[in-house]
Image: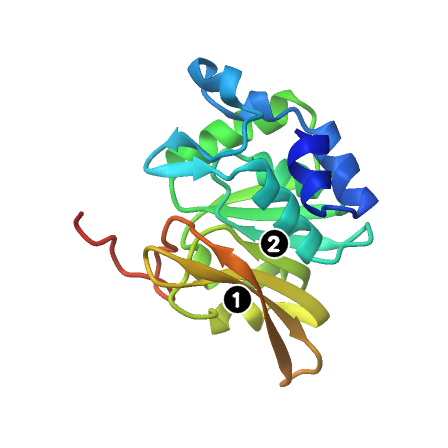
Amino acid sequence: MVERQLKARGIADPLVVDAMLRVPRHLFVEEALRNQAYSDFPLPIGEGQTISQPYMVAMMTEALLLVGGEKVLEIGTGSGYQAAVLSRIAAQVYTIERSSVLARKARAILDSNGYANISIRVGDGTLGWSGEAPFDAIMVTAGAPAVVEEIKRQLAINGRLVIPVGSFKEQVLKRVIRLTESDFREENLLSCRFVPLLGRHGWQDVPQR
């Protein structure tokens, strides 16, 4: 997976490569899907959510420009896999999950495999985690209609936010860097497709198919 899907597509940060090597992805998917855990596509994890393809996990992690020892916030815990990858680089990871079912599953997997530097909270991720702000880096793992002001205001100076922004069907992955208290710089990284970010400052509901 690391050689063919990540390095071959340009993932070069040694911290990210090492983290992807150290986290056993198959532990974060249902047992029936474990033979597909290292394949180049997302997989369902229940509650209408997915575990992102390995390349997207690595790419978003690399986009945070981590150097080690940071305080990181993740919006959308899902299976817990992305948080586990982040925890191998960051000092502390805070992650918020809307679904209590997924949060419980993720907590059980993380606890049983020794991920002690990850805090999980059930709630509306679009509100961020103000009680622990500011964060050196924030990752949003669901597509938002716009960059969420409430979340980006929880960045430290020089902090980086990576967030998919667009419609329900497709988004652009953006990186937002907080330059000063009131000045932010945005850049587009690549096209992507995520499940919608639901909440007060995201989408209010998923459209009927």
Is 186 situated above or below 85?
A: below
Q: Residue 168: x percent and y percent?
A: 32, 57
- Residue at 38% from the left image edge and 57% from the top image edge: 170
Crowdedness of circle 2 by 10 Å Cα count: few (<14), some, many (20+)?
many
- Residue at 53% from the left image edge and 37% from the top image edge: 53
Q: How many marks?
A: 2
Q: What quarter of the picture does the N terminus occupy?
A: top right
Q: Which residue is mark 2?
A: 73
Secondary structure, mark 2, is strand
Q: Which residue is mark 1?
A: 151
Q: Amino acid at mark 1?
A: Ile
Front-most of residues 111 and 146: 146
Q: Is residue 118 left or right of 66 when viewed as pictured?
A: left
Q: Residue 133: x percent and y percent?
A: 63, 63
In which image quadrant can residue 190 be found?
A: bottom right
Q: Is residue 111 left or right of 88 when viewed as pictured?
A: left
Image disc number at residue 20: none
Q: Is residue 128 visible?
A: no
Is 5 situated above or below 94?
A: above
Callouts 2 and 1 close, C-beta under 8 Å: yes
How far apart are labels 2 and 1 at the CA level? 10 Å
- Mark 2 or mark 1: name the one nearer the start of the chain: 2
- Residue at 50% from the left image edge and 21% from the top image edge: 36
Q: Amino acid at mark 2?
A: Leu
Q: Residue 32: x percent and y percent?
A: 43, 14
